[in-house]
Amino acid sequence: MLILAIDTSGRHGSVALCRGDANSCETLQLTKLEGGTYSARLVPVIDAMLRDRDLNMTDVDGFAIVSGPGSFTGLRVGLATVKGLCEILRKPLVTVSMLEAVVLRRGPAEKNVTAVLDAGRGEVYVGDYEQLAQSAKLVREYISRLAAFADPHEAGELLTPDAAVADFLKANGVDIRLVAPVQADEVGRIGLRKLLAGEVADHASVDVNYIRRSDAEIFSAPKR
């Protein structure tokens, strides 16, 4: 199965072409994307990756994309692009939360794990998961002030790919492990497992998972 995986959730994104089955997943190519250029570069990068392998869009068996949380503009560009491709090609789509991907990056385990991502403005995105052998079951996700999250609280193992978050929490007595940032090849591996399990999204109705509202939504809300 040939999977095209996309992450445009942060300042730096990536696209990966992966091939695999129920037993393995190989990264054929991984290309990094600079934030701020997603709308201009995403489709050309996808086209170039396929041409490099003498492939075209119809050869792709399914798409996997990070649906949030993260950059409002980046997420919108990525999801809109993939939804359009799925509509035209009639291919399946799976979504992957970046919080989920961070949890699964730690490897197989059966325990409670919490992923923490820098949300800017002194805030963090938090996802509590029950990690199973090859998947992670969401318990809850929310946004928190970083300083408030540093207060004593009950949680399982804490993971973050953001060094600044790890440094702040460790300085405040929180035991948290810094893990490598997730790129699109990891999204592809997670996406492949979801596609094989039939966990597909409706490309016509699926939306971005921001966790918090955008500035436009906040400031355009009617005053009461």
Image (cartoon, rainbow, N blue to C red):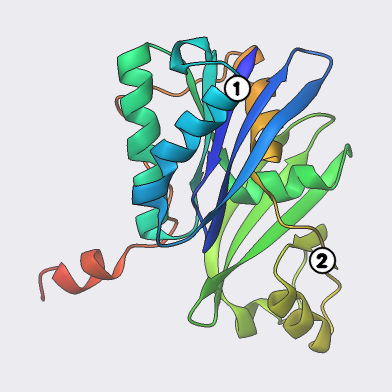
Q: Which residue is pictured at 80% across the width and 29% down the height?
A: 134
The residue at the far bottom in this view is: 171
In the foreground, 92 or 214 = 92
Quick check: 39 left or right of 199? left
**Residue 180 falls left or right of residue 45:** right
Task: Mark yes or no: residue 203 visible.
Answer: no
For residue 171, what is the image quadrant?
bottom right
Q: How many angstroms separate mark 1 from mark 2 (CA)?
A: 28 Å
Number of marks in picture: 2
Say which label, 1 or 2, has the lower sequence index. 1
Q: Amino acid at mark 1?
A: Ile
Q: Residue at x 54, y 13 (%)?
A: 61
Could you tell me which quadrant the C terminus lies in? bottom left
Q: Classify 199 as above or below 40.
A: above
| Residue of label 1 | 3
Tell me the crowding category of disc 2: few under 14, some 14 to 19, or many 20 or more residues within 10 angstroms, Cα based.
some
Q: Residue 141: which numbered mark, if any?
A: none
In the image, residue 123 sits, relative to residue 181, either above or below, namely below
Discs 1, 2 touching: Cβ within 8 Å = no
Quarter occupied by the N terminus: top right
Task: Give the secondary structure at mark 1.
Answer: strand
Q: Position of residue 179 (x, y in %)?
A: 81, 59
Q: Which residue is mark 2?
A: 178
Front disc: 1 or 2: 1
Tag 2: amino acid: Leu
The residue shown at (49%, 50%) is 8
Q: In the image, 223: left or right of 115?
A: left
Check disc 2 and report its element: helix, strand or loop: strand
* Residue 207: % across, % down: 36, 39
Q: Residue at x 40, y 57 (%)?
A: 37
Q: Is residue 165 visible?
A: yes
Q: Residues within 10 Å of mark 1 (few under 14, many from 20)?
A: many
